[in-house]
Image: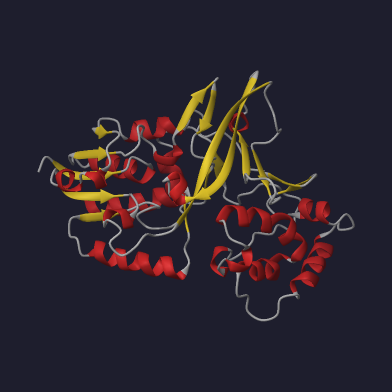
Amino acid sequence: MQYDYLIVGSGLFGAIFAHEAVKEKKRVLVVERRGHTGGNIHSERLDGIDVHTYGAHIFHTSDETVWRYINQFTTFNHYQNCPIARYHDRIYNLPFNMNTFHQMWNDVYTPAEAKARIEEQRTEIHGRPTNLEEQAISLVGRDIYETLIKGYTEKQWGRVCSELPVSIITRLPIRWRYDNNYFNDPHQGIPMAGYNTIIDQLLDGVPVLLDTDFNENRAHLSSLADKVLYTGALDAYFDYSMGKLEYRSVRFDHQRLEGGNQQGVAVINYTDASIPYTRSIEHAHFTFTETDVSWVSYEYPEEYHQTGEPYYPIADERNLSLYRRYRSLADGERRLLLGGRLAEYAYLDMDKTIARALQLSKQEFS
């Protein structure tokens, strides 16, 4: 064996594990299917603006260990995520807070008035909710559901809300304050030098093979190392032998626009079902950059087979059952380690990804 670990995927999980392995004097090789490192946090520098290639990535955490760890590699700015939603010709603040409630109902000014209005509408649902629509109404009432949840969610998942499982929305954050900061975490921001610099430092001194699909040459690549850390889709690792896990995907349309500051905010959610995209992202706002041009990205939800890129697991019971069966196969392979959102069939924020990568590293090297 030439290496101690072959790491499949150069995203945040794989890069952190590689970095920790090198610190322990392990021999590491990284293989990456794409033509660049960094996975979905990769960005491109265009006209002096860091454009998030695969959608907005806003770092936030309450985990002090994770915060200290990631700050070894970058300095974060003070950006706070304060998105807005556009429904027809109206603008609403997100997350749901007192600004939203006053925008929804002009005669609502106080938390008590907002609570009473929502409570009145919640009673429409009797008994335990059986689908996402009933779940959302039982949490925030019909007005908010129809205006800010229904159209967006149906575009995102490609199904009507009455056919989506309750599990997609376990809770909806409500703020009884005039507060537009989306995250409650004490630490949040955007790396001032971009996410690429974090990945570059994590992979410093680590050999990386780009444009290399592990699953197309699994036998040879696996033979190069004592163990394999796999961060890709688990059904692909087993050649879809028991069926395919379902995902929703996203197509990104990045547009260069003259004039700068096109929308006045980094993130706009489009909750009207007639608009085909779910979000528009104006990247310059993440770093408070003022230029004569702007880059705005539009996100179009699509079927997984249309893009070949898995983004959001459809974590209904059928898919979770299938994943557990694949996971049982993986647990039987002594040389195989798993980590990351695809291998775990879970939507993971960046801080959770870092925490899990550090946990696996500790298990392996302590």
Looking at the image, the residue that sits furthest to the left is 1
Quarter of the view holding residue 134 = bottom right
Looking at the image, the residue that sits furthest to the top is 292
Answer whether residue 57 is visible to the viewer in this image. no
Quarter of the view holding residue 334 = bottom left
Answer whether residue 254 is visible to the viewer in this image. yes
- Asked if 221 appears above or below 43 in the picture, the reply is below
State the residue in front, 13 or 223.
Answer: 223
Looking at the image, the residue that sits furthest to the front is 306
State the residue in front, 286 or 84.
Answer: 84
| Residue at the image point whose x is 45% and y is 70% from the top | 317
Q: Quadrant of the N terminus?
A: top left
Count of number-bearing discs: 0
In x, y percent, where is residue 348?
A: 46, 53
In x, y percent, where is residue 117?
A: 82, 66
State the residue in front, 103 or 137.
Answer: 137
Q: Image check: 135 left or right of 358? A: right
